[in-house]
Image: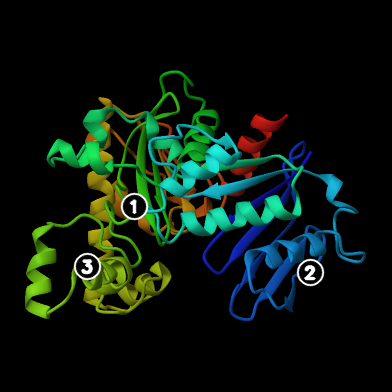
Amino acid sequence: MNILVLNCGSSSLKFQLIDSETENVLAKGICERIGIDGKISYTPYNGKKETVFKDMPTHTEAIGYVLEALMNEKTGVIKSLSEVGAVGHRVVHGGEKFTSSAIINEEVKAAIEDCNDLAPLHNPANLIGINSCKEIMPNVPMVAVFDTAFHQTMPEKAYLYGLPYEYYEKYKVRRYGFHGTSHSFVSKETIKFANLDPKTAKVIVCHLGNGASISASIGGKCVDTSMGLTPLEGLIMGTRSGDLDPAIIEYLCNHENLTVSEMLNILNKKSGVLGMSGGISSDFRDLNAAANEGNEVAKVTLEAYAYRVAKYIGAYTAAMNGVDAITFTAGVGENAAWLRPMVAKYLGYLGVELDEAASEKACGVEGIISTPESKVKLCVIPTNEELAIARETLALVK
């Protein structure tokens, strides 16, 4: 069965067509500037990337162009819509309603809409993509795969905040966690790759990209994660602050004459390693280059970043009363071999021993990067959220 995987943003639409039997990507691409002027980039599995400018007033037109590209006489990979067996949609927030993926019907769409307040930039766009697909392919089964679902196995002691309980009852203010599709995929792949017991394995996944989060899971079920009500909590990120004293918000609002919304914009878009480095970059490659050239601010920024990652690993080791494997994934985690020793140096108390030669080789590919003597396995496992969405979709529609 061919599964179309869609990830709709407010003005963009990423897509992949995946053969669920071989798990090969038949074609992939992105529609950008939807509602502005519009362009589609498309790459078939055996061809070159093509970019075409198209008028895309809404996501419906964008999805129409995606299907056109997939069925193109010269560069297409299918002959008709009947070859698309199902559509898997990434949905950012499922609230407490969804502990797993769900076949989309009117009730599911209403529940996604109920979570719009929790993800105002993402859920409305996800719904637009769902409705547009329903319009064009009314008889094709569709599945919602939620970023938050994997973390719904967290116990109350992990997800409740130290706030009056009425705010949880009224507004469901709690830790939800994000990057769940990636954490689920990578934690399960780690268990297989490191040959761990699937029922008892204690795994910490470090999803380190421009957005970054850490999860702790036992037997493939999440027990804690670093992001919270929103993706702002937790690690220092590319442009997000991560954890801080909440009183800082009022303090800076008063001193800088800012509204709370303006302050949150700073915390989301102008903080993290971008802000800490004095504006050098939110790209870790640029920061590493600056640090190697002797820039002390860049060096301290990266040290603070690695220190925060190590602190969370320590906390989650305590939460699980041990750890069997620690895995690095996502753009920075998979490719920045220089970062791993900066984290591993804090983990000696666990008996962790990093094999730096193995780590240097494991960039963008699976690898065990700990020594044979290490008491905890260190791994690199590339994430593949699109494949994870395709697998979840297949499981529900086959």
Quarter where residue 102 is shown: top right
For the N terminus, the quadrant is top right
Which is nearer the N-term, disc 3 or disc 2?
2
Instruction: Please tell me how crowded label 3 is: few (under 14), some (14-19), or many (20+) other residues with Cα within 10 Å.
Output: some
Instruction: Please tell me how crowded label 1 is: few (under 14), some (14-19), or many (20+) other residues with Cα within 10 Å.
Output: some
Residue type at mark 2 is Lys
Residue type at mark 3 is Val
Q: Is residue 199 above or below residue 89?
A: above
Which is nearer the N-term, disc 2 or disc 1?
2
Measuring from the top left, give residue 173's x and y in whole percent: 25, 44
**The disc label shown at residue 48, or none:** 2
What's the residue at 70%, 71% (across, down)? 40
Identify the secondary structure beneath mark 2: loop
Residues tagged 2 and 1 counted as in contact (Cβ below 8 A): no
- Of circles 3 and 2, the one toward us is 2
Identify the secondary structure beneath mark 3: helix
Residue type at mark 1 is Pro
Say whether residue 395 is left or right of residue 229.
right
Measuring from the top left, give residue 212's x and y in whole percent: 37, 54
Q: Which residue is mark 1?
A: 341
Measuring from the top left, give residue 267's x and y in whole percent: 25, 67
**The disc label shown at residue 300, or none:** 3
Q: Cα distance, mark 3 to mark 2?
A: 42 Å
Say whether residue 178 is left or right of residue 291.
right
Measuring from the top left, give residue 8's x and y in whole percent: 57, 59
Q: Cα distance, mark 2 to mark 1?
A: 38 Å
